[in-house]
Amino acid sequence: MAAFCQALLHYGKLNGCRFLSLRTLELALQDVTGSRLVEKKGKPMHFAMGPRTRGTTPTSDEFGDTASPRAFGHTGAGSSLCWADPATGIHLAYIANARSPERFHSERLRAVNKAVQATI
């Protein structure tokens, strides 16, 4: 997960090898849903063609509140998270072996993201 996210952050290249064209990457990371509310979550969730994007909503459990609108990534089913932020050049891959209730999961992701972003 970390290597894939790093490659996306570096314009489709990893260790000098291109596996995605710049045009494909641009299309894949373009926010296509905007601030549309996701009813099950009760909040807007910006989706691109594959990953999600941070977008411009005021808060974000998944990317941290200080991530740029261009940050992208995705959460897993309960305890994993992977994101990258082109504005800062950092990325995070976080995997835990659990499936947690939504509220606890969101609070934990927010705390992890806050700690990572505090280092920059």
Image: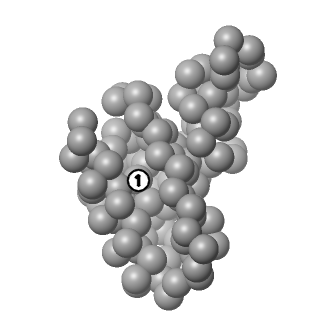
> Residue 56 appears at what percent x and percent y?
35, 48
Identity of the residue furthest to the bottom in this view: 101
Pick the residue in front: 72 or 79.
79
* Quadrant (top left/top right/bottom left/bottom right) for the C terminus: top left
Residue 95 versus residue 29 in the image, above or below:
below
Tell me if 62 is positioned left or right of 7 in this view.
left
Residue of label 1 = 63
Which is more toward the observer, 94 or 104? 94
Q: Point out residue 104 in the picture as x, y percentages from the top left corner.
A: 40, 83
Question: In the image, what residue occupies the spot 65% across and 46% down?
Answer: 1
Say which amino acid is labelled 1.
Phe
Q: How many marks?
A: 1
| Front-lying residue, 26 or 11 | 11
Question: 10 Å neighbourhood of mark 1: few (<14), some, or many (≥20)?
Answer: many
Residue 112 in sight in this render: yes
Q: Position of residue 64 (x, y in %)?
A: 33, 55
Vertical placement of 68 versus 59: above or below?
above
Which residue is drawn at the image coordinates 24% and 41% (left, top)? 119
Q: Position of residue 49 (x, y in %)?
A: 69, 45
Coloring scheme of the render?
one colour
Q: In terms of image quadrants, where is residue 107?
A: bottom left
Whether residue 48 is visible, yes or no, is: no
Farthest right residue?
Answer: 19
> Image quadrant of residue 58?
bottom left
The residue positioned 28% from the left and 46% from the top of the image is 117
At x 56%, y 62%, the residue is: 95
Asked whether 21 or 2 is in front, the reply is: 2
Left of 6 or right of it: where is 19?
right
**Residue 76's quadrant in the figure?**
bottom right
Secondary structure of residue under mark 1: loop
Query: Which residue lies most toward the top here?
Result: 16
